[in-house]
Image (tube, helix red, strand yellow):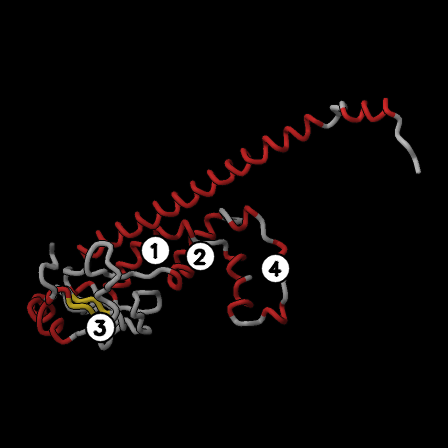
């Protein structure tokens, strides 16, 4: 068995080599984690501001669109939002068009006949449902929310998982993730338009709470039949 001389033990006990590196790691690690935490909080705050701005834009658009003339919304009745894609065209024909028909100043908007915008019912105001008025309100929010949409190439990697094909595809594409792709994307312009035209139609929803901050919605729950008539809501204008 090898033995260590007393003078060698003394030198090892007083050795200071590598102390600077150890101190640097101990001091740098918490500050580095704090720095990363600040960045994440900034991302969360920025995302919250975007969502809040989108809600404000949608609310301001709704105050104009809901009571606006049905002439511009496929004949949909004023003060009524259609979540099932149907539209009431009878009063439109007997009203505005009938009053101005003799003057030759009315040209029926394209798609005003019949059911108007045909689409699937979306009880929660999500994309894929709703009439012309709701679509216009959703567009006001979608423009703002498009800056938060993920990169198109990243969305494509979700498809196998969503279809339950993971056991066949494995981790194909996932090893190509990067901070640039998951954050601003390879092309911010492509990401913006992809979000506006495709992603937000599936991910964004327009809901109408019964009170500020309330979880009870006019467009969900008992009594909801696919449309909301704001003219029948007491103090709806307040």
**From the viewer's perspective, is residue 39 above or below residue 172?**
above
Q: Is residue 2 left or right of residue 128?
A: right
Q: Position of residue 161 (x, y in %)?
A: 54, 67
Q: Quadrant of residue 141?
A: bottom left
Query: Could you give the CA–CA distance between mark 1 and mark 3, rounded to whole angstroms?
Result: 24 Å
Query: Among all residues in the image, which is located at the extreme right?
Result: 1
Q: 37 above or below 157?
A: above
* Residue carrying label 1: 142
Name the secondary structure under disc 2. helix
Which mark identifies residue 173? 4
The answer to whether the residues at label 1 and label 2 have Cβ atoms under 8 Å apart is no
Residue 170 lies, in percent from the top left, at: 63, 66
C-alpha separation, residue under disc 1 versus residue under disc 4: 28 Å
Marks 1 and 4, the one that precedes in the sequence = 1
- Earlier in the chain: of badge 1 and badge 2, it is 1
Quick one: label 3, few (<14), some, or many (20+) residues within 10 Å? few
Q: CA distance from mark 2 to mark 3?
A: 32 Å
Tag nearer the camera, 3 or 4: 3
Q: Residue at x 24, y 67 (%)?
A: 219
Q: Residue at x 54, y 38 (%)?
A: 33
Tag in front: 1 or 2: 1
Q: CA distance from mark 3 to mark 4?
A: 42 Å
Query: Which of pointers 2 and 4 lies earlier in the amino acid sequence?
Result: 4
The residue pinned by badge 3 equals: 224
Q: Secondary structure at mark 1?
A: helix
Q: Quadrant of the C terminus?
A: bottom left
For mark 4, does the 10 Å Cα neighbourhood hold few (<14), some (14 to 19), or many (20 or more) residues? Answer: few
Nearer to me, 223 or 37: 37
Q: Which residue is mark 2?
A: 194
């Amino acid at each position: 068995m090898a033995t260590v001389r007393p003078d060698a033990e003394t030198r090892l006990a007083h050795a200071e080599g590598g102390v600077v590196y150890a101190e640097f790691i101990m001091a740098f690690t918490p500050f580095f984690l704090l720095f990363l935490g600040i960045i994440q909080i900034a991302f969360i705050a920025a995302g919250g501001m975007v969502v809040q701005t989108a809600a404000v834009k949608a609310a301001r658009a709704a105050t104009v669109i809901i009571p606006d003339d049905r002439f511009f919304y496929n004949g949909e009745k004023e003060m009524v939002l259609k979540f099932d894609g149907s539209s009431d065209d009878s009063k439109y024909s007997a009203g505005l068009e009938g009053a101005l028909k003799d003057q030759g100043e009315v040209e029926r908007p394209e798609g005003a006949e019949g059911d108007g915008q045909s689409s699937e019912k979306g009880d929660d105001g999500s994309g894929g449902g709703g009439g012309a008025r709701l679509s216009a309100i959703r567009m006001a929010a979608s423009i703002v929310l498009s800056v938060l949409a993920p990169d198109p190439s990243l969305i494509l990697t979700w498809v196998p998982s969503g279809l339950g094909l993971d056991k066949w595809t494995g981790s194909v594409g996932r090893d190509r993730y990067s901070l640039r792709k998951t954050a601003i994307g390879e092309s911010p312009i492509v990401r913006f338009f992809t979000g506006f035209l495709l992603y937000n139609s599936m991910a964004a929803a327009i809901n109408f709470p019964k009170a500020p901050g309330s979880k009870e919605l006019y467009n969900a729950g008992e009594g909801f039949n696919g449309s909301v008539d704001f003219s029948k809501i007491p103090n709806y204008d307040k």
